[in-house]
Amino acid sequence: MSRRQRVVNAVCILVMELCERLTLFGIVANLVLFCRNVLKLDSPWPSTVGLLLQGMCYLTPLLGGWLADTYLGRFNTIFGSALLYFAGVVLLAAVSIPDDLLGAEFDATARTVYFVVALGIISFCTGGIKANVSPFGADQVKQDGPGAVQTFYSWFYWFINIGALIAYTAVVWLQQTDVFSGYAILIVTILLAMVAFLARRNKYVVKPPGGSQLTETAKIIWEAITKRKQNTSRWMDGAKIRFGGSFGDAQVEDVKALLRVVPVFITFIVYFVIFSQMGTTFLIQGTFMRLQFDNFTIPAASLTVFDIVIVLVLAPLMEHGIYPLLERIGIKVTPLRRIGVGFLIAAASMVAAGLVEIKRREVWQAGDVCRQIVFGEVHDASCFSVIWQAPEFLLIGASEVLANSTGLEFAYSQAPEYLKGVVMALYMAAWGLGSFLANLLVAIVTSGGNSDWYPEKDPNRGRFEYFFFLVAGLQMLDFLLFLYITFSYEYKGSPQLIEDTEEDQEANELTVSTVRV
């Protein structure tokens, strides 16, 4: 296969990713409003549904990657997921059909059941695609060297953000204008994703399934636990062949390296609670602020564009400008330091959201009220401009560059070569758990029918800022935990870590000698 053909393969995969991300972001962007205004779900169910979908979309890649590695291969998993994905989007669009267009009354219970089934299909299928499409694309250009793979991943990131920009501008505007058309257009986008992917179906570089790293890692950990007292003082060493286990020393040491980064990942769970607020609390807050300017209405979900733009601008600026400058003046910018600063900025974004909420409600209480229609529902909103939400989105975007992007880099750099897929899956799992933790917080603050801290139905009648400040406080506590965990962390390849590993090996050899005698 010529280089030109390999590039065409990669381009088709990039276009598919753009269309698939556009589809998913188009579904997620106004999901809370859809649940509240179309399905008429009581609080806190709209936020609960939105957070559950976000969480599942980051946990299902574990299953998608396992299926591809163990049974189906990447091409078949992507194609099969896309087919089911299409069915899920069609079902979701059908749920959004208004009664007057349908010519009959759509039973509310049936509509809700179909909606849940549609989201279940979509969350499963996006995991099958997300886990496999980027490595499948990299497989197409791997023959051209590491530089070609790096270039592919750079373009891959840009295509994702192009899809996000289209979703959070054109699609959300269409949904706010006509709910059904806004979801029906997503049938076209997922269909385009399938067409782009199948355009080169007989030309792709396809690798057969070679076994799951995740399964192998789980076996090593399980055997280490069950044989932890077998002739060794170190529990993981019980899985080594020389201590009666089934695995070689290198495999077990690689899993040890993997487990060293897990505590760092745990601290990301609270950070992802904040990240999930853009599609829930920030969106709800925005719908009760002034959206109409002259003859133009800004969709509340479009404020996410501030996050997307700051990431696209700040990421290369930090990488090629700020970080090198700090290094030149003697400030060492390690990945963990960047992550820590990102956590602090994320907490600041929640403080900013709380302050905006206080001012928004003060303006409303003073009688400066704007009556506007949002997603088919009339709101008596504060005339405090929605543009004042920009700082909270910009701060989250800045934290994303420092914490989220660096977290991915940290995960990749600290993982053993053959376990990079597993460590990236665990990082995505932390993202999903963050959404579930956010759901738990909502359930706690709304328990007993008390919704003052989470007034999803009408923020004018509650104290939304209390929830924002609560999450900011949790992030500060999480930052302290992060400092504790990372204080003595030794990076992969550091002299101290190498010395510790050698000491472990000497201790193991001594133990083996004693046992043999």
Image: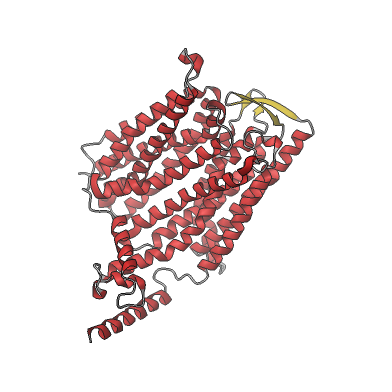
Query: Viewed as shown, does residue 71 lie left or right of 390?
Result: left
- Display coloring: secondary structure
Residue at 56% in and 67% down: 331
**Front one among 326 and 93:** 93
Query: Viewed as shown, does residue 75 lie left or right of 33?
Result: left
| Quarter of the figure with residue 303 | top right
Q: Position of residue 102 (x, y in %)?
A: 46, 15
Residue at 28% in and 51% down: 142
For this orientation, the residue located farthest to the top is 103
Examine the rendered structure and indicate whether residue 258 appears above or below residue 10: below
For this orientation, the residue located farthest to the right is 366
Q: Where is residue 453 in the image (x, y as percent from the top left)?
A: 66, 43
For the N terminus, the quadrant is top left
Q: Position of residue 13 (x, y in %)?
A: 33, 40
Query: Viewed as shown, does residue 31 lie left or right of 223?
Result: right
For the C terminus, the quadrant is bottom left
Residue at 38% in and 53% down: 425
**Front one among 159 and 258:** 258
For this orientation, the residue located farthest to the front is 448
Q: Where is residue 452 in the image (x, y as percent from the top left)?
A: 68, 41
Residue at 44% in and 36% down: 24
Can residue 504 be seen here? The reply is: yes
Examine the rendered structure and indicate whether residue 208 appears above or below residue 213: above
**Front one among 460 and 7:** 460
Examine the rendered structure and indicate whether residue 26 appears above or below residue 271: above
Can residue 184 be seen here? The reply is: no
| Quarter of the figure with residue 422 | bottom left
Examine the rendered structure and indicate whether residue 255 appears above or below residue 48: below
